[in-house]
Image: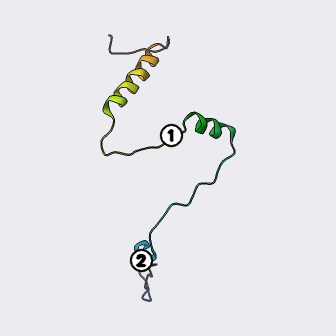
Amino acid sequence: MLQLKQPHFFHRSPSRSQQGQMAFSPVPADDDELIQAIEATHPDNAWTLSNEPDVVGLENFWNEVTADIEKDPEWFTFSND
């Protein structure tokens, strides 16, 4: 078993709440052509987070994904057997 021969005291730095409020740093502008094109086509890029998922939106998206997969000629499903 590992034993410390001399007493060792671990020091903690002050917590963030004692140092002030934490904030994100600003994101620098990117001159990438793709980023500029995306920002030009979606100028109102405001996101809102909620506690409840968008069930209807997820269901519609998943139905589109499964329909796209079923169009693949190499796709095989066991549910039809």
Using residue 41 as the reference point, say whether residue 10 is left or right of it. Answer: left
Callout 2: helix, strand or loop?
helix
Q: Which residue is mark 2?
A: 18
Colouring scheme, one of rainbow, by chain, secondary structure, one colour: rainbow
Graded by Cα atoms within 10 Å as few (under 14), some (14 to 19) or many (20 or more), the crowding at tag 1 reads few
Residue 17: percent from the left, percent from the top?
40, 73
Nearer mark to the viewer, of 1 and 2? 1
Q: Is residue 46 above or below residue 63?
A: below
Name the residue at the front extreme.
44
Q: Which mark is residue 8?
A: none
Distance from disc 1 to disc 2, alpha carbons, whole Å, reads 37 Å
Q: Quadrant of residue 61?
A: top left
Q: Is residue 38 above or below residue 11?
A: above
Disc nearer the start of the sequence (1/2) = 2
Residue beneath the point at 65% across and 37% down: 34
Q: Quadrant of the N terminus?
A: bottom left
Using residue 50 as the reference point, say whether residue 4 is left or right of it. Answer: right
Q: Name the amino acid, label 2.
A: Gln
Q: Name the amino acid, label 1.
A: Asp
Q: Which residue is mark 1?
A: 44
